[in-house]
Amino acid sequence: MAINSEVKALVSPTLSPINITSMEGYEEAKEYVAHAVTALDTSYQSVEAVITARQKMALDESRTERARMLMVAELAEKYTAKVQKAFESSWDKLDKGIRHTEQELSKPVEEYAGIGNVATEIRAHLKAMTQGERMKFLSDALEQNDSRTLQSALGAPSYLSGMSATEHAHYTRLYHNKQSPEVTARLVAMKGAIEKLERAKPVVLQEFASAVGANQREIEKLRAASNAAEAALVMKDFAPVQD
Protein backbone atom coordinates (compact mmCIF):
# COMPACT_ATOMS: atom_id res chain seq x y z
CA MET A 1 0.00 0.00 0.00
CA ALA A 2 1.35 3.46 -0.89
CA ILE A 3 2.29 5.72 2.00
CA ASN A 4 -0.24 8.35 0.89
CA SER A 5 -3.07 5.81 1.10
CA GLU A 6 -1.86 4.70 4.51
CA VAL A 7 -1.79 8.30 5.72
CA LYS A 8 -5.28 9.05 4.39
CA ALA A 9 -6.62 6.04 6.27
CA LEU A 10 -5.30 7.56 9.52
CA VAL A 11 -7.09 10.92 9.15
CA SER A 12 -10.56 11.24 10.67
CA PRO A 13 -13.32 11.37 8.01
CA THR A 14 -14.88 14.17 10.07
CA LEU A 15 -12.29 16.49 8.52
CA SER A 16 -13.03 15.51 4.93
CA PRO A 17 -14.49 18.29 2.74
CA ILE A 18 -16.86 15.69 1.30
CA ASN A 19 -18.95 16.22 4.44
CA ILE A 20 -20.00 19.53 2.88
CA THR A 21 -19.74 18.82 -0.84
CA SER A 22 -22.03 15.80 -0.46
CA MET A 23 -24.81 17.77 1.25
CA GLU A 24 -28.10 18.01 -0.60
CA GLY A 25 -28.31 21.34 -2.43
CA TYR A 26 -24.56 21.96 -2.25
CA GLU A 27 -24.15 22.62 -6.00
CA GLU A 28 -26.79 25.34 -5.95
CA ALA A 29 -25.32 27.07 -2.90
CA LYS A 30 -21.61 26.25 -3.17
CA GLU A 31 -20.51 29.85 -3.67
CA TYR A 32 -21.80 30.60 -0.16
CA VAL A 33 -20.02 27.67 1.53
CA ALA A 34 -16.88 27.28 -0.60
CA HIS A 35 -14.71 28.75 2.16
CA ALA A 36 -15.99 26.10 4.59
CA VAL A 37 -15.01 23.38 2.11
CA THR A 38 -11.56 24.96 1.91
CA ALA A 39 -11.29 25.08 5.72
CA LEU A 40 -12.06 21.37 6.04
CA ASP A 41 -9.76 20.50 3.16
CA THR A 42 -6.97 22.52 4.79
CA SER A 43 -7.44 20.67 8.08
CA TYR A 44 -7.49 17.28 6.36
CA GLN A 45 -4.33 17.92 4.33
CA SER A 46 -2.56 19.51 7.30
CA VAL A 47 -3.06 16.43 9.45
CA GLU A 48 -1.90 14.29 6.52
CA ALA A 49 1.25 16.41 6.25
CA VAL A 50 2.07 16.01 9.95
CA ILE A 51 1.56 12.23 9.84
CA THR A 52 3.79 12.00 6.80
CA ALA A 53 6.44 14.16 8.48
CA ARG A 54 6.42 11.91 11.54
CA GLN A 55 6.84 8.81 9.35
CA LYS A 56 9.74 10.41 7.49
CA MET A 57 11.38 11.63 10.71
CA ALA A 58 11.22 8.11 12.15
CA LEU A 59 13.74 7.08 9.48
CA ASP A 60 16.24 9.73 10.60
CA GLU A 61 18.52 7.90 13.02
CA SER A 62 20.76 10.95 13.50
CA ARG A 63 18.24 12.39 15.99
CA THR A 64 16.81 11.01 19.22
CA GLU A 65 13.15 10.03 19.43
CA ARG A 66 12.46 13.06 21.64
CA ALA A 67 14.16 15.44 19.24
CA ARG A 68 12.16 14.03 16.33
CA MET A 69 8.92 14.39 18.25
CA LEU A 70 9.65 18.02 19.11
CA MET A 71 10.36 18.83 15.47
CA VAL A 72 7.11 17.21 14.35
CA ALA A 73 5.24 19.02 17.14
CA GLU A 74 6.63 22.35 15.94
CA LEU A 75 5.35 21.60 12.44
CA ALA A 76 1.95 20.60 13.86
CA GLU A 77 1.70 23.88 15.77
CA LYS A 78 2.24 25.85 12.56
CA TYR A 79 -0.44 23.85 10.78
CA THR A 80 -2.78 24.21 13.77
CA ALA A 81 -2.52 28.00 13.59
CA LYS A 82 -3.24 27.92 9.85
CA VAL A 83 -6.27 25.65 10.28
CA GLN A 84 -7.70 27.67 13.17
CA LYS A 85 -7.44 30.83 11.09
CA ALA A 86 -9.27 29.14 8.20
CA PHE A 87 -12.00 27.86 10.53
CA GLU A 88 -12.50 31.23 12.22
CA SER A 89 -12.69 33.07 8.89
CA SER A 90 -15.22 30.62 7.45
CA TRP A 91 -17.26 30.55 10.66
CA ASP A 92 -17.50 34.35 10.64
CA LYS A 93 -18.62 34.43 6.99
CA LEU A 94 -21.20 31.70 7.55
CA ASP A 95 -22.57 33.38 10.66
CA LYS A 96 -22.98 36.70 8.85
CA GLY A 97 -24.47 34.96 5.81
CA ILE A 98 -26.99 33.05 7.94
CA ARG A 99 -28.08 36.18 9.79
CA HIS A 100 -28.47 38.12 6.54
CA THR A 101 -30.49 35.33 4.90
CA GLU A 102 -32.68 34.93 7.99
CA GLN A 103 -33.51 38.62 7.67
CA GLU A 104 -34.34 38.17 3.98
CA LEU A 105 -36.79 35.40 4.83
CA SER A 106 -38.38 37.44 7.61
CA LYS A 107 -38.76 40.78 5.86
CA PRO A 108 -42.24 42.36 5.68
CA VAL A 109 -44.51 41.14 2.90
CA GLU A 110 -45.69 43.74 0.42
CA GLU A 111 -49.46 44.17 0.75
CA TYR A 112 -51.69 42.97 -2.07
CA ALA A 113 -52.42 45.95 -4.31
CA GLY A 114 -55.58 44.76 -6.01
CA ILE A 115 -58.63 46.70 -7.10
CA GLY A 116 -61.08 47.79 -4.42
CA ASN A 117 -61.09 46.57 -0.83
CA VAL A 118 -60.18 42.94 -1.50
CA ALA A 119 -57.26 42.95 0.94
CA THR A 120 -59.41 44.45 3.70
CA GLU A 121 -62.15 41.90 3.11
CA ILE A 122 -59.69 39.00 3.18
CA ARG A 123 -58.30 40.18 6.52
CA ALA A 124 -61.81 40.57 7.95
CA HIS A 125 -62.64 37.05 6.75
CA LEU A 126 -59.55 35.66 8.49
CA LYS A 127 -60.24 37.59 11.68
CA ALA A 128 -63.70 36.05 11.96
CA MET A 129 -62.26 32.52 11.92
CA THR A 130 -61.09 30.44 14.85
CA GLN A 131 -57.34 30.01 15.18
CA GLY A 132 -57.52 26.47 13.80
CA GLU A 133 -59.60 27.55 10.81
CA ARG A 134 -57.27 30.47 10.12
CA MET A 135 -54.16 28.31 10.23
CA LYS A 136 -55.69 25.80 7.84
CA PHE A 137 -56.84 28.58 5.54
CA LEU A 138 -53.37 30.12 5.38
CA SER A 139 -51.70 26.73 4.99
CA ASP A 140 -54.00 25.97 2.06
CA ALA A 141 -53.19 29.37 0.56
CA LEU A 142 -49.48 28.53 0.79
CA GLU A 143 -50.05 25.14 -0.79
CA GLN A 144 -52.01 26.73 -3.66
CA ASN A 145 -49.54 29.63 -3.97
CA ASP A 146 -52.41 32.08 -3.42
CA SER A 147 -50.37 35.28 -3.31
CA ARG A 148 -53.44 37.50 -3.13
CA THR A 149 -54.61 35.98 0.15
CA LEU A 150 -51.14 35.77 1.66
CA GLN A 151 -50.10 39.29 0.72
CA SER A 152 -53.39 40.66 2.04
CA ALA A 153 -52.96 38.92 5.38
CA LEU A 154 -49.22 39.24 5.83
CA GLY A 155 -48.75 42.69 4.30
CA ALA A 156 -50.59 44.35 7.18
CA PRO A 157 -50.31 44.30 11.00
CA SER A 158 -51.08 40.88 12.46
CA TYR A 159 -54.04 41.97 14.57
CA LEU A 160 -56.01 43.04 11.48
CA SER A 161 -56.26 39.37 10.52
CA GLY A 162 -56.71 38.10 14.07
CA MET A 163 -53.22 36.63 14.18
CA SER A 164 -50.67 36.84 16.96
CA ALA A 165 -47.30 38.37 16.14
CA THR A 166 -45.78 34.88 16.35
CA GLU A 167 -48.28 33.43 13.87
CA HIS A 168 -47.73 36.37 11.53
CA ALA A 169 -43.95 35.89 11.64
CA HIS A 170 -44.36 32.14 11.08
CA TYR A 171 -46.46 32.52 7.94
CA THR A 172 -44.30 35.37 6.69
CA ARG A 173 -41.32 33.03 6.82
CA LEU A 174 -43.24 30.25 5.05
CA TYR A 175 -44.36 32.70 2.39
CA HIS A 176 -40.78 33.79 1.66
CA ASN A 177 -39.66 30.16 1.63
CA LYS A 178 -42.29 29.45 -1.01
CA GLN A 179 -41.46 32.53 -3.08
CA SER A 180 -37.67 32.19 -2.86
CA PRO A 181 -36.70 28.51 -2.64
CA GLU A 182 -33.14 29.30 -3.73
CA VAL A 183 -32.69 31.59 -0.72
CA THR A 184 -34.05 28.90 1.58
CA ALA A 185 -31.69 26.33 0.03
CA ARG A 186 -28.79 28.72 0.60
CA LEU A 187 -29.71 29.05 4.27
CA VAL A 188 -29.93 25.26 4.68
CA ALA A 189 -26.49 24.86 3.05
CA MET A 190 -24.87 27.50 5.24
CA LYS A 191 -26.35 26.04 8.41
CA GLY A 192 -25.21 22.59 7.32
CA ALA A 193 -21.69 23.87 6.65
CA ILE A 194 -21.38 25.59 10.02
CA GLU A 195 -22.57 22.39 11.72
CA LYS A 196 -19.82 20.43 9.93
CA LEU A 197 -17.20 22.95 11.08
CA GLU A 198 -18.55 22.78 14.62
CA ARG A 199 -18.16 19.00 14.62
CA ALA A 200 -14.69 19.14 13.06
CA LYS A 201 -13.15 21.82 15.28
CA PRO A 202 -12.43 19.66 18.37
CA VAL A 203 -11.45 16.73 16.15
CA VAL A 204 -8.68 18.80 14.54
CA LEU A 205 -6.79 19.17 17.82
CA GLN A 206 -7.22 15.47 18.59
CA GLU A 207 -5.96 14.54 15.14
CA PHE A 208 -2.86 16.73 15.43
CA ALA A 209 -2.04 15.24 18.84
CA SER A 210 -2.43 11.76 17.38
CA ALA A 211 -0.30 12.70 14.36
CA VAL A 212 2.49 13.98 16.62
CA GLY A 213 2.23 11.05 19.00
CA ALA A 214 1.85 13.18 22.14
CA ASN A 215 -0.58 15.72 23.56
CA GLN A 216 0.24 19.37 24.20
CA ARG A 217 1.09 18.82 27.88
CA GLU A 218 3.60 16.10 27.03
CA ILE A 219 5.17 18.24 24.32
CA GLU A 220 5.54 21.16 26.73
CA LYS A 221 7.37 18.90 29.21
CA LEU A 222 9.72 17.67 26.48
CA ARG A 223 10.29 21.23 25.30
CA ALA A 224 11.04 22.46 28.80
CA ALA A 225 13.60 19.66 29.29
CA SER A 226 15.15 20.42 25.90
CA ASN A 227 15.39 24.15 26.68
CA ALA A 228 16.97 23.42 30.05
CA ALA A 229 19.52 21.12 28.42
CA GLU A 230 20.42 23.74 25.81
CA ALA A 231 20.73 26.43 28.49
CA ALA A 232 23.17 24.20 30.41
CA LEU A 233 25.38 24.01 27.32
CA VAL A 234 25.81 27.78 27.07
CA MET A 235 29.31 28.89 28.06
CA LYS A 236 29.27 31.30 31.00
CA ASP A 237 31.65 34.02 32.17
CA PHE A 238 32.63 33.63 35.79
CA ALA A 239 33.63 36.40 38.15
CA PRO A 240 37.09 35.93 39.69
CA VAL A 241 37.21 34.42 43.16
CA GLN A 242 37.69 37.06 45.83
CA ASP A 243 40.30 36.27 48.54
Image (cartoon, rainbow, N blue to C red):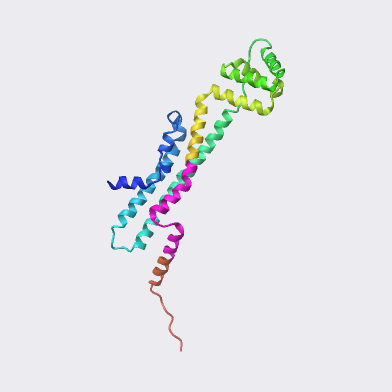
In magenta stretch: residue 218: yes
Q: Position of residue 160 (x, y in %)?
A: 71, 21
Q: Position of residue 84 (x, y in %)?
A: 46, 47
Is 50 rendered above or below residue 182?
Answer: below
- Residue 89 visible, this angle: no
Which quadrant of the view contains residue 54?
bottom left
- Residue 171 visible, this angle: yes
Q: What residue do we see at 51% from left, 35% from top?
A: 191
Q: Position of residue 154 (x, y in %)?
A: 64, 21
Residue situated in front as seen by the camera: 97 or 59: 59
Main SS category, magenta section: helix
Q: What residue do we see at 64% from left, 22% from top?
A: 135
Q: Which residues are magenta?
A: 197-224
Residue situated in front as seen by the camera: 82 or 131: 131
Q: What residue do we see at 46% from left, 46% from top?
A: 85
Residue situated in front as seen by the camera: 126 or 176: 126
Is 190 rendered above or below residue 160?
Answer: below
**Residue 9 relative to residue 110: left or right:** left
